[in-house]
Image (cartoon, coloured by chain):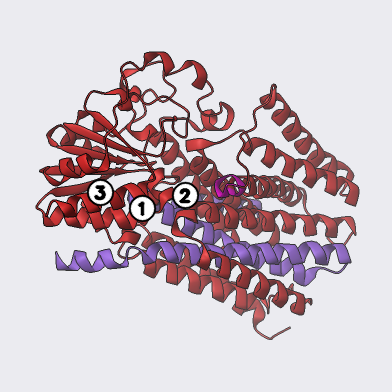
Amino acid sequence: MIPGAEFIVPAAYFAAAVMFIYGLKGMSSPVTARQGMIWAGIAMLLAVLVTFIHPKVEGNYGLMLIALVSASGLAWWWARIVAMTDMPQMIALYNGMGGGSAAAIAGVELLKMHSGQSDMATTTLLVASFGAIIGSIAFSGSLVAFAKLQGWLRKTWRFPKQQLINLVVFGITILLALIIFVAGPSPFLLVLFFGFALAAGILITIPIGGADMPVIISLYNALTGLAVGFKGFVLEIPALMIAGIVVGAAGTMLTQLMAKAMNRSLTNVLFAGFGKADEDAGGGEATGEMRSIDATDAAIQLAYAEKVIIVPGYGLAVAQAQHKIWEMTELLMSRGVKVIFAIHPVAGRMPGHMNVLLAEAGVDYEMIEDLEDVNAQFPNTDVALVIGANDVVNPAARKDPSSPIFGMPILDVDKARNCIVIKRGQGTGFSGIENLLFFEDNTRMLYGDAQKVSQQLIAGIKSLG
Amino acid sequence: MEGWIALYIFMLAAFTGIEVIRRVPAILHTPLMSGSNFIHGIVVVGGMVVLGMADTTAEIVVGFIAVFLGAGNAVGGYVVTDRMLEMFKSSDKTKDKG
């Protein structure tokens, strides 16, 4: 053992904990956010390096290096090549890895106990098993979420008695934890225990889809934090406890903020399944017909407007249209049109996702307005241009008490003088709810892929000279 | 670790987490989720400790998985967050102008 390690290691961990909190705090403003991440990055590097001389670490240095280098290389490479639009699922993937790591740590601890090398105190064993369950659920659940967002898993499975089956699987997991607690861990019991915990994560996630995905990813992020915090207790590393719990608490708050922005409670997200009443909601109430418009006419409307509000949604992200939209916006602004962007808190697949995409294209974030500020401006707006957004502009949330999204705060685009909706097809949106906006008298549908349509709009505006 | 002290750490850390996020503007929600995702990548340290203590093959294999997954969480989380925050760079300049 390196002399002084008993002091150096905890001191470095302490410094890392301070830098983590400082770094996270820096992220509360766009100006200091990057600097905050640098602090957190230094903290991570310091903590990892100093762990090589941790008094409890006695060997396997080679394997440790191999695991560190190979995982870092792969994760770095994949995170670099992925398109900005795919960021949400990358968060899910890397978060799942963290949960899996916490679960694996619990696995080693329990195996050690089985071979009689460590006798954990009662509380420690309980915390270890609890962390194992949470970590496993976050792991398998996040991976399912990743597969869904990546498009590898397109179906949303709902089967009869789903809640009951989930409850039984979860109950068996707890029961196995208790058996391990009383009878001691045997390899067979451990495999069974982790198997059931992983199955619980999968079962909870497969029925969830649509607009609920970001909420569930945020929830798993919080759960991983909690699991990491528990591992910190078991391994007696307070830095792990602090970092884990801070993330767990912040993540829980963020999850609630997101659920609230959609007017749904967390239990609703987890147990109700989004828009279960889809089939009988909407449909009948939508009166009138959808009227379409072609790009040339739409370009004229935009070019001669005084004020345009652009409402981006997930369709913009899918079509990678952010650059074209910005090009069009610059054209309009050069003609003296006042253009602002209105972003709903849950537009896209993550809160802030649209902001990131628009920022990528070069849109100044002062041109972007939040829901609260922008809604008053619609009545004196000439054209509201909706690009691939659907549920967040559905007036049913205001008008139709039977709609599953009734009460959800929306952008009141229907109050603008004209509303142009760029949409790929006539189908319903992510949630499967009929959108009353499309049937309004002042709404015109502009069908097509957002990228191509914006290209046509640019050409149209240019041809007006 | 002393149970009560752990409980105090737990409580204080939870309040810190809630306070830190309360003042965050909506435009930073995704980068923040990503950033906190990076921070719980500190679990890699726990993985290293258990791998360092592992003796049997089973322990070594599971410990290796712990380090591998933890390192992926940390590095991937960092790069994703950094790429997102990079997007806000140009906006800072325009802000200085105005």
Numbered disc total: 3
Write down the chain letter for disc 1: A
The extreme bottom residue here reads A3
Q: Amino acid at mark 2?
A: Ala
Range of residues picked out in magenta: A146-151
Please tell me whether residue B2 belongs to the stretch shown in magenta.
Answer: no
How far, Cα to Cα, is label 2 from label 1? 32 Å
Q: Is residue A59 left or right of residue A143?
A: right
Q: Nearer the viewer, mark 1 or mark 3?
A: 3
Q: Residue A7: give x, y in percent of width and height.
A: 61, 78
Sequence-wise, the earlier of marks 1 and 3 is: 1
In terms of depth relative to the viewer, which is nearer, A305 or A91?
A305
**Marks 2 and 3, the one that precedes in the sequence:** 2
Q: Which residue is mark 3?
A: A457
Q: Is residue A149 magenta?
A: yes
Q: Which chain wears red?
A: A
Mark found first going from the N terminus, 2 or 1: 2
Q: Which residue is mark 1?
A: A321
Residue at the (62%, 38%) spot, across then down: A205
Residue on which disc 2 sits: A250
Q: Magenta span: helix, strand or loop, mainly?
A: helix
Quadrant of image for the N terminus of chain A: bottom right
Q: Can residue B77 be seen in the rendering of this structure?
A: yes
